[in-house]
Image (spheres, grey):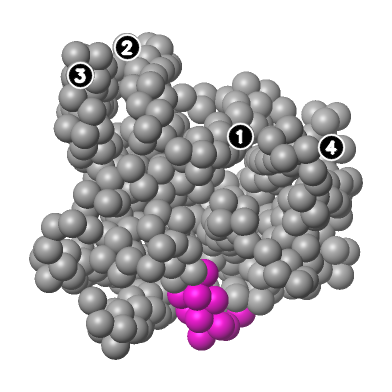
């Protein structure tokens, strides 16, 4: 592919992101960060909120201006796609388009909470970008005059966004330092800077006073207890037809490249698991099923050592490091699975990248990308406009002086916007300030003749 065509495709991807991100509505915590609450938190430097200092500051900035939000989101997503593709195969535009397609087709709940929702984006998407940049620098052993500063900053800033990612980055930096020392008997100062940055970030995050409340069980929202992680992973990661299709193709490729009785048996078992997952969402004792799925898949890939190189082992390890803390904290949500989803895409696409680029179906991939983007843009914007209609109706009723307003709870259950209307107890004040409405109103959510009043 000519360089001019590559540049044109990159530019079109970025422009398409600008067009899409511009339509993302503000919701939930965005109203709070954009108003008095955000000013108070910044003044107190988030001492009663959390240790996500970088994410909170970014949320305060982008929740106040849609142009800034659009540019920031587009740049972050573009860099995620660009450097993920670099990790898969250096400088391949078609693989970048394929990754973009799979990015757009992620689970809509993950997309709603970690991409559309500005506050979630600042933490989870930004943390995912730092993670991918760290992987890119480490796996490619990037080294230049002041590279230690870059490694330090990447791990330090990347540790001020999401708690489980902070712990995962520390574990990753520790493992890569130990592994490098045993292999070379030398200290890699870039890796050491990565470890020091992650330690400093970890300390700054968890020394925030808000976490002491969690440890003392005095926090009404967060807690340290075993979660139902396996139930959440199932619909958001395992019941994803596009990701499962990618896995099936990858397994078939591995079997094709290494035909043996062992590979055919294990590969067939893994693909049977995937097919069952695609068609049967509710299964008895899903944890056992997912564990079997993971063990069989991991075994199949590990035994093919010629295919699984050092980089893929590191990516697989990082996925495990990200997942482990999620077993012990509450609450968790679909947004927690964004970095896992992205790493899975990198992992499986890396296995079949050479196979993909041999086929001359560039125009077909571009055509599919256009269709997928158009469909995704349309589907989400239908929801955005529906949300806007309901929200404008609510604002009109408030300004007309209605004190008690009824809304059907299906607005939340079927919506692709995270908290499109004031739902939590503190949302009402921020909503009124953000949209400059009258105060002193109450909202009831009705569902099957049951009323839920969240303001009392």
- In x, y percent, where is residue 241? 23, 40
In-front residue for pair 1/218 = 1
- Real-space CA distance between mark 3 and mark 2, rounded to the nearest whole angstrom: 33 Å
Q: Which residue is mark 3?
A: 260
- Regarding mark 1 in the picture, which secondary structure is present there? helix
Q: Tell me whether the residue at label 3 lies in contact with that at label 2, contact meaning CB atoms closer than 8 angstroms.
A: no
User: Is tag 4's residue or tag 3's residue first in the polypeptide sequence?
Assistant: 4
Considering only vertical position in the picture, is 224 above or below 33? Answer: above
Q: Which residue is mark 4?
A: 213
User: Is tag 3's residue or tag 1's residue first in the polypeptide sequence?
Assistant: 3
- Regarding mark 4 in the picture, which secondary structure is present there? helix
Mark 3 burial class by Cα count in 10 Å: few <14, some 14-19, many 20+:
few
Is residue 224 rendered magenta in the image? no
- Real-space CA distance between mark 4 and mark 2, rounded to the nearest whole angstrom: 37 Å
- Give the residues in magenta: 64-77
- Real-space CA distance between mark 4 and mark 1, rounded to the nearest whole angstrom: 25 Å
Left or right: residue 229 compared with residue 173:
left
Q: Nearer the viewer, mark 4 or mark 2?
A: 2
Q: Main secondary structure of the magenta part?
A: helix
User: Is tag 2's residue or tag 1's residue first in the polypeptide sequence?
Assistant: 2
Q: Which residue is mark 1?
A: 321
Q: Tell me whether the residue at label 4 lies in contact with that at label 2, contact meaning CB atoms closer than 8 angstroms.
A: no
- Real-space CA distance between mark 4 and mark 3, rounded to the nearest whole angstrom: 56 Å
In-front residue for pair 236/44 = 236
Q: Nearer the viewer, mark 3 or mark 2?
A: 3
- In x, y percent, where is residue 150? 73, 66
Residue occupying image coordinates x 41% and y 35%: 308
Q: Nearer the viewer, mark 4 or mark 3?
A: 3
Left or right: residue 321 compared with residue 290:
right
Q: Nearer the viewer, mark 3 or mark 1?
A: 3
């Amino acid at each position: 592919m000519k360089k001019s065509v590559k540049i044109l495709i990159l530019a079109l991807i970025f422009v398409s992101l600008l067009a899409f991100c511009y339509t993302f509505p503000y919701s939930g915590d965005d109203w709070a960060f954009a108003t008095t609450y955000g000013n108070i938190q910044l003044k107190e430097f988030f001492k009663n909120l959390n240790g996500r200092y970088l994410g909170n500051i970014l949320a305060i900035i982008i929740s106040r201006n849609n142009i800034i939000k659009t540019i920031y989101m587009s740049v972050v997503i573009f860099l995620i796609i660009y450097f993920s593709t670099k990790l898969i195969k250096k400088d391949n535009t078609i693989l970048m388009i394929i990754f973009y397609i799979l990015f757009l087709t992620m689970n809509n709940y993950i997309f709603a909470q970690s991409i559309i929702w500005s506050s979630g984006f600042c933490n989870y998407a930004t943390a995912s970008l730092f993670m991918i940049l760290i992987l890119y620098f480490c796996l490619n052993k990037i080294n230049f005059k002041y590279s230690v500063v870059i490694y330090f900053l990447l791990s330090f800033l990347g540790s001020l966004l999401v708690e489980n990612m902070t712990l995962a980055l520390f574990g990753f930096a520790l493992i890569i330092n130990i592994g490098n020392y045993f292999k070379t008997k030398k200290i890699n100062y870039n890796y050491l800077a990565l470890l020091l940055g992650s330690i400093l970030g970890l300390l700054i995050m968890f020394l925030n006073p808000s976490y002491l409340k969690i440890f003392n069980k005095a926090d009404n929202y967060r807690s340290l207890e075993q979660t139902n992680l396996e139930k959440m992973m199932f619909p958001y990661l395992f019941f994803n037809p596009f990701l499962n299709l990618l896995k099936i193709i990858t397994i078939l490729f591995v079997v094709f490249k290494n035909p043996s009785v062992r590979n055919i048996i294990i590969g067939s078992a893994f693909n049977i698991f995937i097919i069952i997952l695609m068609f049967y969402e509710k299964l008895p004792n899903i944890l056992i099923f997912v564990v079997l799925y993971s063990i069989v898949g991991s075994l199949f890939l590990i035994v093919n050592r010629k295919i699984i190189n050092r980089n893929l082992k590191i990516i697989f390890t990082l996925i495990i490091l990200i997942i482990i803390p999620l077993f012990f904290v509450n609450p968790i949500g679909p947004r927690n699975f964004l970095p896992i989803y992205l790493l899975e895409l990198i992992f499986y696409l890396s296995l079949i990248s050479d196979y993909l680029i041999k086929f001359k179906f560039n125009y077909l991939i571009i055509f599919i990308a256009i269709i997928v983007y158009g469909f995704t843009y349309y589907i989400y914007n239908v929801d955005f406009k529906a949300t806007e209609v309901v929200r404008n109706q609510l604002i009109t009723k408030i300004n007309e002086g209605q004190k008690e307003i009824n809304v059907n709870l299906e607005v939340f259950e079927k919506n692709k916007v995270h908290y499109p209307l004031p739902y939590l107890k503190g949302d009402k004040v921020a909503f009124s300030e953000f949209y400059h409405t009258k105060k002193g109103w109450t909202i009831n959510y009705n569902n099957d003749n049951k009323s839920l009043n969240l303001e009392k």
